[in-house]
Amino acid sequence: MKNLWIVLQHVEWEGPGIIAQEAAHRGYEVEIRRLDREDALPDADHLEGLVVMGGPLGVYEEASYPFLRKECELLETTARSGKPVLGVCLGAQLLAKALGARVFPGHGEEIGFGSVELTPAGQDDPLFAGTGNAVPVFQWHGDTFTLPEGAELLASSSMYAHQAFRFGSRAYGLQFHVEPDPGTWAAWQTHLPQGLLDNAASQQKAIESAGKKIIASFFDQVMATETFERR
């Protein structure tokens, strides 16, 4: 089980993209669990790290998606134990709820190419090293969340203040997407508003470039912490 990372995926078209690539480059074994296909949730003791992807469901829809409650329990256990966690979009909302925050419908949908502004804490955080103060991202959500107690706010957008946070040193929630690779963009094409991805190659490349830096920093930070803990 050493070096096993679990990716929790909620729908077919929201896979890990660049996250899986950067994990593989560092020798991590990545196993995807498709919760929409009733794959079992892992035991928190048997994983090295946890990645939770996005999806169209709401964190508060436990009656329709019973696995959400146990998913939040897994996230809380993993994050509070100090193991690395990366939550993306819905995954960030689930992490926020798992840590005691409130998740709720926002004042409007935020969908499309845009950017987030780093807070002073975000500018100092190793996750965003080398990205600049404004990070190109893709937004695809209508829900938002309060900041979990003890978490550090790292990024905001003009529409929603809570866009990225860190809990402890190795648990991160990103409300936005920086993980798409070319295969991800292609898979999203039929699920987004018509024409949104047309003639957007330069915007996609900018997000991929920023995403590689951010996700590489996440795994490098994890590895640095592991090395320090073994000393």
Image (cartoon, helix red, strand yellow):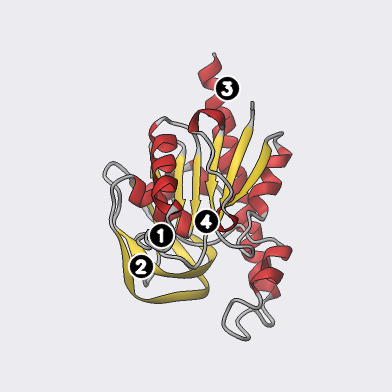
Please report contact status of discs 1 and 2: CB closer than 8 Å, yes or no: yes
Please report contact status of discs 3 and 4: CB closer than 8 Å, yes or no: no
Give the Cα distance between marks 2 and 3.
36 Å
| Residue at x-position 44% and y-position 74% | 110
Tell which circle, 1 or 3, labels the residue nearer the N-terminal end. Answer: 1
| Between marks 1 and 4 in the image, the one whose residue lies nearer the viewer | 1
| Between marks 4 and 2 in the image, the one whose residue lies nearer the viewer | 2
Q: Residues within 10 Å of mark 1 (few under 14, many from 20)?
A: many
Residue 28, located in which quarter of the rendered image? top right
| Residue at x-position 50% and y-position 36% | 84
Q: Position of residue 16 (x, y in %)?
A: 63, 54
Q: Residues within 10 Å of mark 2 (few under 14, many from 20)?
A: some
Q: Position of residue 103 (x, y in %)?
A: 32, 60
Q: Name the residue carrying label 3.
A: 227
Give the Cα distance between marks 3 and 4.
28 Å
State the mark number for residue 160: 2
Q: Name the residue carrying label 4.
A: 132
Q: Name the residue carrying label 1.
A: 163
Depth order, front residue of 100/26? 100
**Element class at badge 4:** loop
Depth order, front residue of 231/117? 231
Give the Cα distance between marks 1 and 3.
30 Å
Tell which circle, 3 or 4, labels the residue nearer the N-terminal end. Answer: 4
